Image: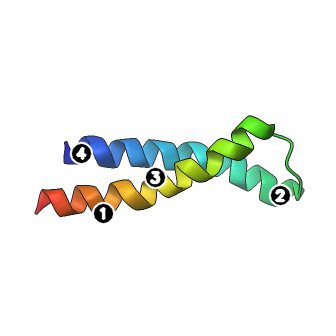
Amino acid sequence: MCLVNLAAADLLFTLGVPAVAYTRYTQSWRLGETICRLLPYTQVSYIFFAPTSIDRAR
């Protein structure tokens, strides 16, 4: 279960990286309102999944 939590967190985080990179490069948001609302959840999920997995692995 520990590996599944970390894998899910890594996938969510990595999927958001291109959107952030594109926005930083163009200095504008053109990816739509849906992605704009979902992106913070994918980044925050990494903060919660990783410590939970590390704690359960002990």
Q: Earlier in the sequence, mark 2 or mark 1?
A: 2
Nearer-the-camera pick, 58 or 18: 58
> Residue 46: image x %, image y %?
44, 55
Q: Earlier in the sequence, mark 2 or mark 4?
A: 4
Residue 3 badge: 4
Q: Residue at x 89, y 53 (%)?
A: 28
Picture quadrant of residue 34: top right
The residue mark sitting in front, 3 or 4, is 3
* Horizontal arrangement in the rendering, residue 43 relative to residue 6 (left or right): right
Identify residue for label 2. 25
Spatial CA distance of label 2 from label 4 is: 33 Å
Q: Residue at x 70, y 54 (%)?
A: 20
Identify residue for label 1. 51
Spatial CA distance of label 3 from label 4 is: 15 Å
Q: Residue at x 69, y 44 (%)?
A: 37
In the rendered image of this protein, does residue 22 appear above or below residue 32? below
Mark 1 crowdedness (10 Å alpha carbons): few <14, some 14-19, many ≥20: few
Q: Earlier in the sequence, mark 3 or mark 4?
A: 4
